[in-house]
Amino acid sequence: MKAHRLLLAAAIALPGLAFAQTFTFSNSTPIAVPSPPATGGIASPYPSPILVALTSCPNATISAMRARVLGFEASVPQDVDVLLSGPLGQTLVLFGDRCYTSPLPPPGIDLTFEDGAATLPVASSCSSGTYAPGQFGSVSFPLPAPQPPPPYGTTFASLGLIGGPAAAANGTWALWVVDEGSFATDPGQFARGWQIEFDITGACPPIFSYTPTPPGPVTGSHTTGLVGSTANLAIGVTVATPGFGTGAPATTTLICSPPPTPFTGFTQTPTAVGDGPVSPTSLTGTCTVAATTQTATLNCIEDRGGFEVPISFQLVCPAGIPVARPAHTLSGQALLLLALALLALGAVAYRRLS
């Protein structure tokens, strides 16, 4: 039901300005208006949710927002009212009482809403494009109902997120759609669901992912299996979330403290700038195999442009097989006893011959 897309904005900034990145979150489930059988014009689903998970980078700022409805079909489009709500109860009427006079047959139209755009037509038919949010006349959402109560916001700026930290938008956003017309048989839908989109600015570093996922375990492997042999350990490092922006803050480096015995190594420092690459692509180390399994903690720091995140792994050195002595090998004590026995036998034999 829920799809997430991550788009890199084609915003080649002017010198001195940071790049922007656009995060688009989607719910492609069709929204039927009204749901059959008719329930007072309430759409199905009601609401249609999208879970937003933006970067928590301290430097990330929301510079713009927009919402999009896809495949809007309606026999009487001016009867459709659409409300957007945010995770903290923020609200915004995207449109209502618009697009008079003409039905919108399949495949419908795609409407993008953004502050500062043109006004959606009132007394004429509508076509796909980008428009400012807003209503003409009044919108009507049935009460009591689960949607937030009025008054409702009129611009994306009124949501209080633009210019603030990206993480403030995290949570469930919802689209509430009703048909306020008198005829419950008016067919309508958003055939391909809807989207919400955020433009993010600020120099933010990439975030690493690891194989295995911390804390592991990270288990060594050896070929001989004997006590005293060497086992090899490796941790794969890749870029999970690309960075964006410019300058040193967009660099992430992983630095690990020397592990305790019997482990050695893990001295590499994987570094990624922007969206990569990471070089080297793994942390490697060794351990000296003993007769029992040995463990230790590898402590590392992900330095995300001065913002440090601790990462730890459990290292495991597998147990080995004790080195067996060959059957024909005799100890020094056994050799001494054998020599004494041979001397005694020699003395006996000498007396008999004398």
Image (cartoon, grey):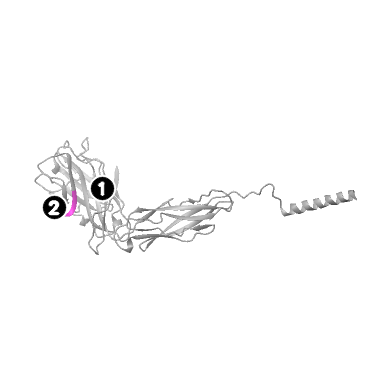
The amino acid type of the residue labelled 1 equals: Ala
Using the image, determine if residue 259 lies above or below residue 24.
below
**Residue 3 as seen in the image, left or right of residue 238:** left
Mark 2 or 1, closer to the camera: 2
Between residue 184 and residue 142, name the one nearer to us: 184
Q: Which residue is mark 1?
A: 174
**Residue located 24% across and 47% down the image:** 195
Which element carries disc 1, helix, strand or loop?
strand
Residue range of the region highlighted in magenta in the rendering: 112-118
Image marks 2 and 1: residues in contact by CB distance under 8 Å: no
The CA distance from mark 2 to mark 1 is 24 Å
**Residue 200 belongs to magenta span:** no
Which element carries disc 2, helix, strand or loop?
strand
The amino acid type of the residue labelled 2 equals: Ala
Can you give x and y, in whole percent of width and height, for residue 93 in the image?
Answer: 19, 50
**Residue 352 as seen in the image, left or right of residue 218:** right
Q: Which mark is residue 161?
A: none
Can you give x and y, in whole percent of width and height, for residue 154 in the image?
Answer: 18, 54
Which part of the image, by quadrant, shows the N terminus?
A: top left
Q: Is residue 312 visible?
A: yes
Q: Which residue is mark 2?
A: 118
**Residue 220 as seen in the image, left or right of residue 162:** right
**Residue 115 belongs to magenta span:** yes
Using the image, determine if residue 15 lies above or below residue 142.
below
